[in-house]
Image (cartoon, rainbow, N blue to C red):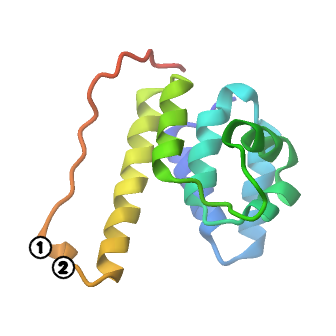
Amino acid sequence: MKFNKEEIKNILNMLLSEDEENRTLAFECIENHFKKENIADLLVLYQFSKVPSYVWEKNCKKGYKYLKKVLNIDNKNYRIPSSILFEKLLDIKTSKEIIELYLELFTKQFSENLYSLGYPVNKFDIQIKIKDYGQTTKS
């Protein structure tokens, strides 16, 4: 089973929740449905969940094992540079829907970072358009 965009957003919200039960359910959902073909979903969830790698390793053994292999993760640093993660998404021929979701989440995170640095984010609009990058959409 492959998650759609909304399901990924819901799982991400559960991972970002302060409620430990929500996180546990999210990890169970990820672990129960993880297949190698779903690595793009897992990459997006890992990047934006703000959950340290040791927590992923403990709660999502199958998925984390594959993430570690794909991203060369060391347990000391769970944050992967956005450029590397985006490149991996393109390398594995990720669907346009997941690329769009990644860019949406990246832009939101970027805006939050700018706001925290004192930039007046209410005075500008950041838009990213995706060009046809020649990948086939997987379903």
Q: Is residue 82 above or below residue 120?
A: above
* Residue occupying the far bottom of the picture: 118
Circle 2: element type:
loop
Asked where in the image residue 118 lies, by quadrant, the reply is: bottom left
Front residue (pair 40, 70) = 70
Front residue (pair 39, 6) = 39
Quarter the N terminus occupies = top right
Quarter the C terminus occupies = top right
Disc 2 target residue: 120
Circle 1: element type:
helix
Q: Are marks 1 and 2 in contact (CB under 8 Å)?
A: yes
Q: Residues within 10 Å of mark 2 (few under 14, many from 20)?
A: few
Q: Residues within 10 Å of mark 1 (few under 14, many from 20)?
A: few
Numbered label attached to residue 110: none
Numbered label attached to residue 123: 1
How far apart are labels 1 and 2 at the CA level?
Answer: 6 Å
Q: Is residue 44 above or below residue 4?
A: below
Q: Is residue 29 above or below residue 122?
A: above
Q: Is residue 20 left or right of residue 89?
A: right
Asked where in the image residue 80 lies, by quadrant, the reply is: bottom right
Front residue (pair 99, 53) = 53
Type of amino acid at the residue the image marks with label 1: Lys
Residue 33 coordinates in the image, percent (x, y): 76, 37
Asked where in the image residue 133 lies, by quadrant, the reply is: top left
Residue 94 seen by the camera: no
